[in-house]
Image (spheres, grey):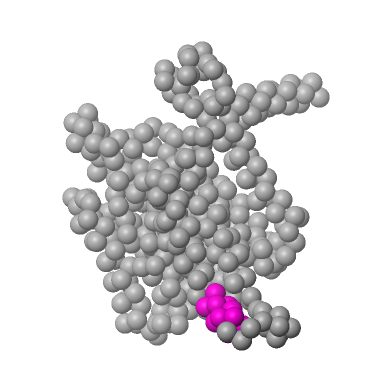
Amino acid sequence: MGSLIFYLRKLIKIFRSEVLVLPSRVAVMLFFLFIILFPIIFPDPYYYRVIVLASIFAILAASWDLLSGFTGQMNFGHALFFGVGAYTSAMLNLNLKIPPIASIPLGAVAAVMAGLIIGIPCLRLRGTYLALTTLSFPIILVGMIFAFPGFTGGELGVSGLSRLADSYIGNYYIVTITMLVLVTVMWKITDSNIGIILHAVREDEIAVRTSGVNTTRYKLLAFSLSGFFAGISGGLYAHYMRVAGPSTLEVNTSFLVVIYAIFGGIATIYGPVGAVFVLIPLLEFLRFLEHVRIPDQILSIMPDLLGKFLVKFVEILPNTRMFIFAFFILMILLFMPDGLLPWLRDKVETQCPRCKVRNISRRQTCRICTADLH
C-alpha cells in the first residue's frame, strides 16, 4: 500500500510539473478526454460517425506530415498508401476470411512496400518533379483496378467487408483509440533523434550528408513509416465503411490531406490532427444549409418579388457549402500562414531564447533556466 501511494504521488508530481505548466499540453489532455468521453456526452450514432471519420483522416493527415512536413519530400499522391491499405485489407478479408484485426496490419505492410516502390525511384527528385511523380502513382493504380474488374471490382470496388465491431460504440473506440495511439507514436518519432535528422534533411540535405548521415536511408524510412500509418487508416476506413473502391485513390483525397496539414500547421503532427477535427465537423455542420426552408405563411405575407428572391436564395444555399468551407480555409491561410494551431500556440506560449523550452506567455522568466523572456 505504501509503494502504491509513493507512485501515485510521483505521478501527480509529474502531472503537475510536466502537463499543467503549458496550455498546449493541457489542451492535448482535454482532447484525449473529449475523445474518450464523447459517447457519454453525445449518445448519437450520427455524431459517432463524424468523429470516427475524422479520426481516420487524422491518421492519414499526420502520416503525410511525417513524410512531407519533416523531410520536405512533397508527396501529392498520398492517397496511394491509403488505397493500398484499404484494398489489401479488403481482399484479405473477403478472399481469405482474415479478420480485420489481422488484415488491417497486413494492409499497412503492403502500403509500406508501396512506400518503398515510390521512395526508391524518387530519391533523386525534388520539388515539382517529385510532387508530379508521386501524383502519378495512384492514377496508375486506379487504371490497374479498372483493368481487372473481376478481381478488384472495377469502378464499384469491393463490398461486404467484416465490421470492426458489432456495435457503434465498439467501432468508435476501436478507431479513436487507434488514432490516439498512432498519433502519439508519430509525435514521439518526430520528437526523437530520428525526427531531428528528418527535419535537418528538409532544411539542408547536403549539410546533413556531409556530416556522415545516410540521408537515403532516412528518406526511405520516412516513406515506409508514412506508408505504414496511412495504410492503417485505409484499412480502418475500408472495414468501417465496409467497402473499398477507387474513391480511396482519388487525387482529391491526396489534396485534402495536404490542405489539412497546411491548415493545421506543417511539421507539427498535432497540426494536421487538429485541422481534421475542425474541418470535418465544420463540413457536417454546414449540411444544415440543405434543409433550410421558408414557411409558406411567411412567403404569403411578403411582396411577390421579395418572396421569389428568398426562394431562389434558399435553393442555392446547398451549393454554397463548399464555398463557405473554402473561404474559411483561405482566411486561415491568409492571416495564419504557419497554420492555425501554431498560431494559437504562439499566442499563449513563448520560447526561451536561451534553452529553447516553451513557457506560458505571462511568465517573465524561463521556468528552467530563469532567463528573461521579455
Q: Residue at 51% of width from left, 13% of height from top?
A: 370
| Image quarter of residue 15 | top right
Q: Residue at 29% of width from left, 40% of height from top?
A: 202
Image coordinates of residue 155 in percent, x first then y, are 41, 82
Q: Residue at 50% of width from left, 43% of height from top?
A: 341
Image coordinates of residue 26 in percent, x first then y, are 62, 36
Asked whether, in this view, residue 328 is left or right of residue 299, the answer is left
- Front residue of this view, candidates 230 and 359: 359
Q: Residue furthest right?
A: 1
- Front residue of this view, candidates 21 and 298: 298
**Looking at the image, residue 67 lies above or below residue 174:** above
**Looking at the image, residue 56 lies above or below residue 160:** above
Asked whether, in this view, residue 16 is left or right of residue 275, the answer is right
| Image quarter of residue 260 | bottom left
Image coordinates of residue 91 in percent, x first then y, are 46, 73
- Front residue of this view, candidates 362 and 167: 362
Q: Residue at 21% of width from left, 32% of height from top?
A: 207
Note whether residue 63 is visible. Answer: no
Asked whether, in this view, residue 136 is left or right of residue 356, the answer is left
Image coordinates of residue 357 in percent, x first then y, are 48, 24
Stretch in magenta: 306-317
**Looking at the image, residue 351 lies above or below residue 176:** above
Asked whether, in this view, residue 271 is left or right of residue 38, the answer is left
